[in-house]
Amino acid sequence: MNNRNFRIIFMTMLVFVLSTPLVFADELDIISSANAQKFGMLTLIPPIIAIVLAFVTKNVVVSLFIGILSGTFIVKFTGSNIIFTLVEAFLDLVSRSLNSLADPWNAGIILQVLVIGGIINLVAKMGGAKAIAESLARRAKTSRATQLITWCLGILVFFDDYANSLIVGPIMRPVCDKMNISREKLAFIIDATAAPISGLAIISTWVGLEVGLINDAFVGIGVKADAFGVFLETIPYRFYNILILVFILISALLLKDFGPMRKAELNARQRGNSGTVSANEMKDSCDLEPKEGVKLSIWNAIIPIGTLIVTALMAFYYSGYTSIINGDNKELINLFTNSPFSLLAVKEAFSASDASVALFQSALFASIVGIAMGVGKKIFTISEAIDVWIDGMKGLIVTGVILILAWALSSVIKELGTAKYIIVLLQGSFPAFLLPSLIFILGSIISFATGTAYGTMGILMPLAVPLAHSLNPDMSFIIVSTSAVLTGAIFGDHCSPISDTTILSSMGAGCNHLEHVKTQMPYSLFVAGITVLFGYIPSGLGLPIYVVLPLAIIAIFAGIQIFGKRVDEVEVELNLVNE
């Protein structure tokens, strides 16, 4: 098991701890609250064991398995026979794994990951990936241009963070390799444009959750407000989302990096000059090579990938449309009856869509298109095309295993009340102006520890809005505090080694997972620091956004100038890198 796989396991398992919707959510919430009080610090054992073992053993499957077993042991232990408790804990582990796979959302995620892997392999074997790489390489003649193109592609795939991670990486990986840009830098750009842009977009798979949580929180404090309007007002205050995108842009334009990322970039340039690559990278390159004798054409990539994106948008709309039409909200039903394609209707449809099903539907249809193209152009026979498609899934089977174990671990952590214990542990008195910053930090801690932005939002929103309203009932202050929940959850999820998007970004970039986490962590922490010092503290003091946001962007620019060094001056650094 390589480093990438075990890191993927950690991130996923905790990511879904809080994000997995359960039928008996209210009952489980009562149980988790009781367990948080009963077990106290013991609730932290499963995630800590899983994370520590992953880094020590470099084996994610084993680490996740032991992490789950430790959690089920705590749940089942009654002070009686330890051997009997271990047997019960093992049976509980098996049950949780089966239930995780039986959940339609989880099954959809695994299927769409596997099917997209099949599409990517079809595109590669038809020569589409290489043709796109060569076409982009002709335009991306410099490291700067390549990074900017990757950044733009990440923003264009705004509607879903999973789709972003799985589409952008395989397309840009050959181009980045040719330009001697490190896989770590590619993974960072993918990861930093996935959840951040999906969280900001007014039409995405995130909107429904965010708007729903905002609405429930305002209903809870007795304030009548348009939840979507509040969502829009929070966008300028999503400092981390905005600033991490700005960070990528400035870093690419200046060609400056610092910390472990700079070393990775220098190593990539040295490797390119010396012509040496690792065995894994050699395998990645071979896997992307087209079938012998195939005439390269960018349409062999544009049509299948374009079909995936367009049908994904259509599937999101259709999924939400059917959900609303079959529901009991007469106002929304009338909206879709009278103006089915208005901006508001599209927004509501995306909000109500089932992302896992929509992505699987679109990926399966794009696969059919890809297979038909390959057969129609006489690149493959039907049997060969299906074999290529299935072969593309094989490399992602371990990801599916990791996801199942991660979901099982997440269910244990949720039942133990780990997140609730963390909240109680960090409660205390503080000045009102610090509330947005403290919400951001608390959200970051919970999201990092659990690997889930969705779950963190669900936990914090009902607490943050009433607290903000009690300290300062001014709507602008409540909006700033609300934005801190949304962006703090994304920051923690972005840099967490057990986050699903972190795992998928590593996979899409073909990057060692731990190296991705290690190299992007300083960048995430730097932007988070700017977010607090130049974003939420000034906003908490009442400074207007048209002052705060430009100052924060200037701080990002200044920080890169001060701490960063150019990475195109390789010759001067090679001796230092080898030390």
Image: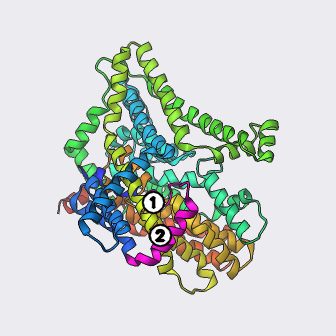
478 and 6: which is toward the camera: 6
Identify the residue under disc 2: 419
Few, some or many C-alpha atoms within 10 Å of disc 2 (few <14, some 14-19, many ≥20)? many
**Local SS, label 2:** helix
Q: Which residue: 52% across, 38% down? A: 359
Residue 168 appears anywhere in the view: no
Q: Residue at x 55, y 58 (%)?
A: 24
Name the one closer to the observer, 141 or 369. 369
Give percent across and percent down for residue 488: 53, 66
Would residue 48 be found to the left or right of residue 463 on screen?
Answer: left
Query: Quick check: 220 above or below 135?
Result: below
Which portion, as a residue range, is magenta?
Answer: 14-41
Q: Is 364 inside the magenta-drawn segment? A: no
In this view, 415 is above or below 61: below
Going from N to C along the chain, the mark reached first, 1 or 2, is 1
- Whole-Å distance between the Cαs marked 1 and 2? 9 Å
Relative side of 351 to 132, left or right? right
Residue 558, given in percent of the width and then of the height, sits at 48, 68
Which residue is the extreme one toward the left? 579
Q: Nearer the viewer, residue 208 or 263?
A: 208
Residue that numbered label 1 is attached to: 17
The answer to whether residue 296 is visible is yes
For label 1, count other residues whose C-alpha is less than 10 Å away and answer few (under 14), some (14-19) or many (20+): many
Q: Amino acid at mark 1?
A: Val
Q: In the displayed structure, would residue 239 be above or below residue 194?
A: below
- The answer to whether the residue labelled 1 contacts the one labelled 2, judged by CB atoms less than 8 Å apart, is yes
Q: Residue at x 76, y 60 (%)?
A: 226
Q: How is the image coloured?
A: rainbow
Give the amino acid at mark 2.
Answer: Ala
Q: Residue 87: give x, y in percent of width and height.
A: 28, 59
Q: Dominant secondary structure of the magenta stretch?
A: helix
